[in-house]
Amino acid sequence: MKLLKLVPDDTNIRFLRWRKLAMTISLLSIIASLVLVGVRGLNLGVDFVGGQMIQVTFDRVAEAPVSDLRDDIEALNLGESTIQRFGQPNQVSVRMRLAGDNVDEVNAVTSRVTQMITKEYAAQGARIDGVDSVSGKVSEELLTTGVYSLVFAMLAIAVYIWFRFEWQFGLAALFALFHDVVLTFGFFALTQLEFNLNIVAALLTIIGYSLNDTIVVFDRVRENLRKYRKMDMIALLDLSTNETLARTVMTSLTMLIALLVLLLIGPGVIFGFTAAMTLGLFVGAYSSVYMANPILVWLGVGAHSFIPQMTDADKAAAKLKEGVGGAQP
Amino acid sequence: MLDFPRWKTISISLLLALGVLLAIPSLLPASVSPYYPSFLPQEKINLGLDLQGGSHILLEGDPKDVAAQRLENMEETVRAAMRAAKPRIGIGDISREGGKLSFLVRDVSQVDAAREAILPMTTGAGLTGQRDWDIEVRDTSRIVLTPTEAGLTEALDQAMETATEVVRKRIDELGTREPTIIRQGDNRIVVQVPGLEDPEALKELLGQTAELEFKLVDQNASPEDIAAGRAPVGSEVVPYPSNPAGGTPIAVRRLGGIRGDKLTNAQASFDQQTNEPVVSITFDREGGARFARLTQENVNKPFAIILDGEVLSAPNINEPILGGSAQISGSFTTESANQLAIALRSGALPVELKVVEERSVGPDLGTESVQLGLLAGGIATIAVLVLMAATYGRFGLYANIALILNIFLILGIMALMNATLTLPGIAGFVLTIGAAVDANVLINERIREERKAGRRIVQAIEVGYTEASRAIFDANITNVIAAVLLFLFGSGPVRGFAVVLMIGILTSVWTAVYVTRMFVAIWLKRARPRELVI
């Protein structure tokens, strides 16, 4: 039986040869993402800005009559509205400001729009698929908790890695995560896909999974640091990356298969969600090699970081000894 | 590695069998479920609202509303107490300004008596025994009652508790299946009603405080004063949108009316003469007696039927109504009469509830989502299975069996926990399928490496498992951290996603590490292979 080998044996790619270039690209893309978010802004959904969103599917046509719909809704004179496709080409969402905090007023607006759509677009098979309305107060809370959850997740994971490895690894992981999250934000600013609660969920998942790669590489780095105590750090990082390359490719591939299937045939409602995670997969794999590793180099990680394993107290004691008797550890 | 003890094999197999057994009820199509033996576990995975259609509504009560209500009640209690005191204590200049109740005791010598009479009404909130009103005497004859923080908190808590009960009753009256009604935080209620056809009717029903009052119309008020919003002393102006005289408001006497909380029944029906929809109400004994007295004393005078601060109608009392039941008219439709009847039957809300968040999904979109999600999951699984088998041969097959068992385990545990599967949850499921094999990839790659480094078969496998486990453990802990935060901060569907993710991480590590290890151990023992194809 001949087995499939995605990555040839004993690869020796010198990944970190391009680390300065890669770092420059990473920093530039972080800046570009931040600028994009600043200039274009995120297309925030009702989850985060409040308002109401009505989802409509036009069952009998391939493409939703967006411009007709826009005119008809404008004719209702209910204030500003945003109409955009989501998921399939025959699905649209209509977003409007909330008419106030009175149930009757909001209901009145909703039913005027839904009645108009089901009546005027009966021939196109218009079907109201859902109504979301979120008050300003709730949307503010959702935004705050969303931001908190992202920040806490990143910090918690960095702290965990600090405990399991060393502080340099925690810091490197934190930067890699920051890179992944910021780039995803940039992607959403660029594409103007709707940024809603689901996307925050996707970001948290990215934070969890993109670290898988980083940790697998870190684990190998730690192992190799103990094995090859004299090896040059950059060579050692390259070796570790190469040794884990087959696994990285294979796992990324299985996850990519799952995500692509979801992206292509999965429910349209979660398109943005799967798109974010697919992007996160690539960005995460890249950042574990080109963000996390170079940072380890710059933070001066070497064999001495692990052997002997010492607590701060030990180190202090050792230093004291060194000062007194110059004993070698 | 070779000595995988029998008890371990047996317990792992039993756990797996249990997981599969638990998953079965959720996988059976509805047509087969009735024939499923009843001695087996019955728990099923719930479909979230986004998958089966329905409404999620978040209601919020205003603490200020509760405070105002409480102040008003206090005023009435104080008035009654002063009247009942012997000798009667005369009070005046009552004010509710600034959230405090203050009044003048006309006879300075009675101030102490008044204070004594009020004191018992101001203690005893909650278990802490804290005072819920502070009493103060100012300028020798003015008594000021200030609500304490503890008292307000307690009042809000009680109001929300009652409101939750009222909401539950109202939704039960609608006859929807399996509604979920949960109090959240200090002043919120989450309502989830699956498969709801008309969320707007539900919102209207929940938004109605349904505070019914019967008050005498103040016929001395001049139309000019009413138009200017002024009412004579002891009266107040109330809007009357369906007033036959052009929708103008009317003035009603503030006190001496009856509240509609003393009802035993309310039904929508039709007026026998006009055939208009009306709501028939039946008072309880005390309410009936008071209603009889009110109507007896005021024959030929109009009284206003007020619902949530708006006059519904103001009929004349033609004769005393002694039977304890009455009819409320007020330009209803059949539907609105029915709604009011439900609201009155379930009691008034102690606090006005506002809808601060609503998410409704139509049933069609949900069905579509489930189908597409299942299809995507199926295709992803097959693709991953093929890739794993092609790459790792026998070890790939073991990983595949583990993956399939893992899918059953996730479903089984979700069923056991009565967890809810949401649309993002399905995505999490598919993602878990893609990620679950990671542990096996790590192990198998490590075994390949160790073989290349020249280790013997058994040793290579042994080292592969132990060395890879460390990275598997660390990598999955970070995923758990992210999933836990997702659960803590997320809401609704996102929580469903977090649950699937967490269960998936735990079961996949278990199946990928222990279950495959068991297969490998059995194989090594039986076949004693000389060659390792991996």
Image (spheres, grey):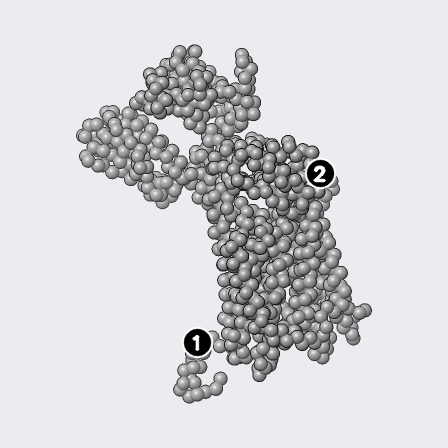
Subunit that carries the residue with mark 1 = A
Q: Residue B290, relative to residue B491: is it above or below? A: above
Q: Dot 1: within a 10 Å radius of its alpha carbon, few (fewer than 14), some, or many (20 or more) residues?
A: few
Mark 1: amino acid = Ala
User: Which quadrant is the N terminus of chain A positioned in?
Assistant: bottom right
The mark lying in front, picked from 1 and 2, is 2
Query: Which residue is painted at 71% across and 42% down in the image?
Result: A62
Subunit that carries the residue with mark 2 = A
Secondary-structure class at tag 2: loop
Mark 2: amino acid = Arg
Query: Which residue is painted at 46% across and 17% down in the image?
Result: B244
Residue B269 pos. (x, y %): 55, 19
Give whichever of discs 1 and 2 has the lower sequence position.
2
Q: Residue A223, relative to residue B493: is it above or below? A: below
Query: Which residue is painted at 67% across and 59% down in the image?
Result: A256
Which residue occupies the foreground of this view, A4 or A56?
A56
Q: Is residue B205 visible?
A: yes
Tell me, for residue A313, which label it has, or none.
1
- Where, by quadrant of the figure, is residue A320 drawn? bottom left
Residue A226 pos. (x, y %): 58, 79
Q: Which residue is mark 2?
A: A60
Secondary-structure class at tag 1: helix
Labels 1 and 2 within one chain: yes
- Where, by quadrant of the figure, is residue B11 drawn? bottom right
Query: Which residue is painted at 53% across and 40% down in the image?
Result: A80
Report the side of A83 relative to B183 (left or right): right
